[in-house]
Image (cartoon, rainbow, N blue to C red):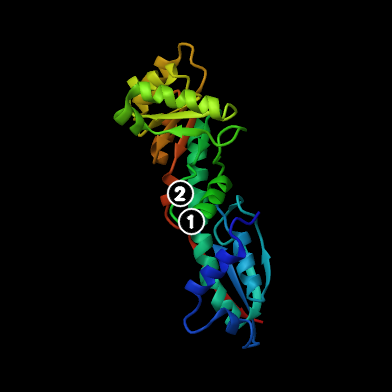
Amino acid sequence: MLMLDDVALHCLLKRDRHPGVTVAEATSHDSRGMTVTLRAGAAGTVCGLEEAERIFTLLGCAVDIAAASGARVETDDLLVAARGPLASLTSGWQPAQSLIEWASGVATATADFVAAARAANPGIVVACPRKAIPGARPLALKAAVSGGAVVQLGASPTPTLILAEHFAFEGAASVRDRVAQMRQTDPGRAVAVEVETLAHALAAADLGADMIQLRKMRPEEVAATARSLDRGWTGQLIAVGAIPISLAAAYATSGADVLMTSMPYHAPLADIRVAFERD
């Protein structure tokens, strides 16, 4: 399913078009037929092919995509083939390539993290936060899901989150009042409390939090918190931070129910190779 609408894609075309060529010009002159292909430069998980297809379609090209977002591809696998006037192809290939490079980089990093975490703990849930790079949120969330992560926990609406700063500035009594108020105003919505210390995690459990987010805690700190909470609290324990792939296994076996990592949003670009062929 497309995550970027035509307005967003037209903005990409406006910013990234070939110098000296407007979108209108690209669809109105130079009838020489050519084909441009985009192929994987390395193995990975792809994302954004549907948006690339739409970019070329907006420019009047005939397009075929060889895989869907979330597919695993190998080096030199064909991803997109677009046929049309040279001006249209030169207007579309750079925006399409850039979009696929970024989205596939995120999807590949997510998939690699999920694989590493589940090799250590097959039942672990991997999530990516809905807070993503400004301006890139829709594509970032699509890429994370394409890589096997979730972006919303549970079947209920997005939980109400009480940030760790509330403990620091207002104290546990104020947090207790906030939790009670949320229960009253929206009883069907889960309450998540973010903490940075074991003491605050225990306090959050006592306050009745449905979810406790452990912000930037080390694996051994998460493990200690999980052991301390394993005395009757039945909520969901979430380790949150820019958790790298190298620590995925350590966090996956720490006792957390969910690993929420923002690391994929800052992953290297995927290698996407472009070639032109005259018909």
Rendered view: 15 above or below 231: below
User: Which residue does the numbered mark 1 point to in the structure image?
Assistant: 136
What residue appears at the point 43 percent right and 43 percent down from the top-left corner?
A: 262
- Frontmost residue, 24 versus 253: 24
Confirm or deny contact between disc 2 and disc 1 (CB under 8 A).
yes
- Which quadrant, please, contains the C terminus? bottom right
Type of amino acid under label 1: Ala
Type of amino acid under label 2: Ala
Rendered view: 253 above or below 24: above
Using the rendered view, name the quadrant where residue 50 is placed.
bottom right
User: Which residue does the numbered mark 2 point to in the structure image?
Assistant: 132
- Which quadrant, please, contains the N terminus? bottom right
- Frontmost residue, 208 versus 234: 208
- Disc 2 and disc 1: Cα gap in Å? 7 Å
The crowding category of the residue bearing disc 2, from other C-alpha atoms within 10 Å (few below 14, some 14 to 19, many at least 20), is some
Task: Please state the horizontal and vertical placement of residue 257, each as a whole percent of the image.
Answer: 50, 27
